[in-house]
Every structure is written in C-alpha cells, then in structure tokens.
Image (spheres, rainbow, N blue to C red):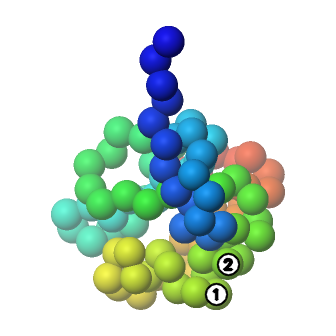
Amino acid sequence: MKRLPQRTCIGCNTKKDKKELIRIVKNKNGEINVDLTGKMEGRGTYICKKEECLNKAIKNKKMARTFEMEIEDSLYEKIRKFICGGEIIG
C-alpha cells in the first residue's frame, strides 16, 4: 500500500495527509495563489480546512514569514470563503 505524503499545517502545526490541506503557492513573479491541484510551481505552504487554523496563521504572520513578504487581506478572505463555503477560488 502506498503511503500518502504528509504535510504540516502552518496554523496548528499538525501533520496531515497532503490531500486534507489547502496549498498556497508563491510563484517566481511574487504572486500568491491557492493551489487546488497541488501541482503549481513555486514555494508552497499548507493550511487545514479550518477557520481557526487560518486565524492562527494570520495572527502569527506565518504565511508572511514563509513567503518573506506582506500578504494582502484579500488573499486571506479568499481562503476564508473557501474554508467556510467550499467555494472554488479563481
């Protein structure tokens, strides 16, 4: 049986299967996107599909530290909408 890749959530620091987490990617141009496929190129970080994990990541500025840049509130709101409503982010 093949083992699923494990990743760590930046909000709660728990290891989970990669498929259970949302991947956020910074590409070479400095653009940050939500990667629903898990295959986009660039520096990636993972977060649980829970609002409290997103709130912890925002409070501790984990995403900003990972990507070494300020994160716009609009990105956090896109992630929050996806977590709460399951809405596809474009």
Q: Is there CB contact under 8 Å for labels 2 and 1?
A: yes
Name the disc covering residue 59, or none: 1
> How many numbered marks have been drawn onto this rendered protein structure?
2
Which residue does the image show at 32% across and 82% down from the upper left? 68
Give the CA distance from mark 2 to mark 1: 5 Å
Q: Which residue is mark 2?
A: 56
Residue type, label 1: Lys
At horizontal 76% and vertical 65% (from top left) the residue drawn is 51
Q: Is residue 77 at least partly visible in the picture?
A: no
> Is label 1 in a helix, a strand or a loop?
helix
**Up/down of 13 relative to 38, above or below:** below
Using the rendered view, name the quadrant where residue 9 is placed.
bottom right
Query: What amino acid is at disc 2?
Result: Lys
Determine whether, in the image, residue 87 is placed left or right of residue 30.
right
- Pick the front one: 33 or 42: 42
Question: Nearest the camera: 49 or 26?
Answer: 49
Q: Residue furthest top?
A: 1
Q: Is residue 67 above or below residue 14?
A: below
On the image, the x and y values in percent for residue 17 come to 57, 39
Side (left or right) of 21 relative to 33? right
